[in-house]
Amino acid sequence: MEISVDCYDGKTSKKQRLLLKFEGKIVVLVSDQGEQSYPIQELVISRRLGGASRRIEMPNGLVCEASDNDAIDRLLRLSGIQVPGRLIDKLESKLRYVIIAVVITSTIVWGVISYGVPVLAKHVAFMIPVTANTALGDSVLVVLDKTIFSESQLGDTEKKDLRVLFSKLIETVSPEYQFSLEFRHGRNIGPNAFALPTGTIIVTDEMVQMIDDRHELESILAHEIGHVVYRHSLRKLIQSSTVALVIMAVTGDISTVSVLAGSLPTILTETYYSREFEREADEYSYEYLTKNGISPTHFANILGRIADSGTEIGFLSTHPSIDQRVLMFSEQ
């Protein structure tokens, strides 16, 4: 048995076309300079992978490439050596196996992205001390003020009254969170509210002006506090950076958080929270209202009013849908 191979001597890039002969368990390489013999056990032969050429490494550093995969496999079988890569080659050669592999791989990837990454992100987020959230929030409000907001037009007395209301909401929250309430003119984003991971809650003037009952604003503030308590900003940030998520989970190194902080303003104002995050924040607001004897319909009322105003971005640009959320808070 013999085949033609392309060989390289390891000293130059010049390719030589040589003849490879198989004689029992001896491989003979024939060139113009003569013949070189090698025991087959001393050769390193790469695995079979589709129609790719096989790499054959000789003990003296010579490397050859053979395109006749079947001949190489016969050589290995006759020599009593197991043929590497045969199972993979068989699977690749059958269309039905390829389709099955694609389906299985797609299912696994979908499962990891849809379920695995969020679970791991939640685990990592709660590993990080609350005090470390300052790395995420200290500069975020500055960025938002430069790009999204303008100075609030609300009067000082009104702001003071609303901050008194806010202080009531945070009385039962763990003291490790440092909450504060800020007001901004929303400009293009209209009636809206944001929660920074530091505990800073931002409410736009447009949202305050739409309030008919103080309990409506109370329900919204409770919703935003829920985002902070459940670490939604940090979890969203981590989920958006899968590589950083893996590094942080495996090594425990949380220094990566400060590197990711620059993308938080975009996450807060453009991507919004997931269905699961909004559901958790809604439930936090619902529990607060019911525990304090406040009708949950106040939250449903303000959501419905925002929807009727034609607002397309901001507080309603999330999942679940407005109808589902109104239904939840309308039930007594």
Image (spheres, rainbow, N blue to C red):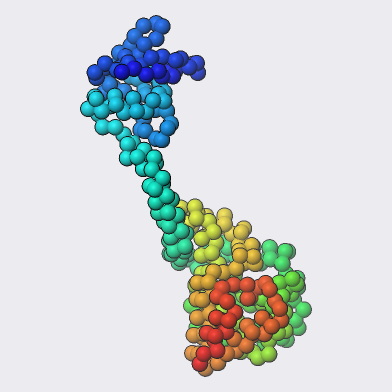
The structure residue drawn at horizontal position 26% and vertical position 23%, both measured from the top left corner, is 41
225, above or below 272, in the image: below
Q: Residue furthest left?
A: 80
Residue 12 spot, x, y in % from top left: 49, 16
Residue 177 spot, x, y in % from top left: 52, 74
The structure residue drawn at horizontal position 52% and vertical position 90%, both measured from the top left corner, is 331
153 relative position to 129: left or right: right
Q: Residue furthest front?
A: 95
Residue 288 spot, x, y in % from top left: 51, 86
Q: Quadrant of residue 183?
A: bottom right
16, above or below 196, in the image: above
Which of 306/102 is in front?
102
Q: Quadrant of the N terminus?
A: top left
Q: Quadrant of residue 186?
A: bottom right
Residue 151 spot, x, y in % from top left: 75, 73
109 relative position to 149: left or right: left
57, above or below 324, in the image: above
The structure residue drawn at horizontal position 46% and vertical position 58%, both measured from the top left corner, is 110
Which of 212/321 is in front?
321
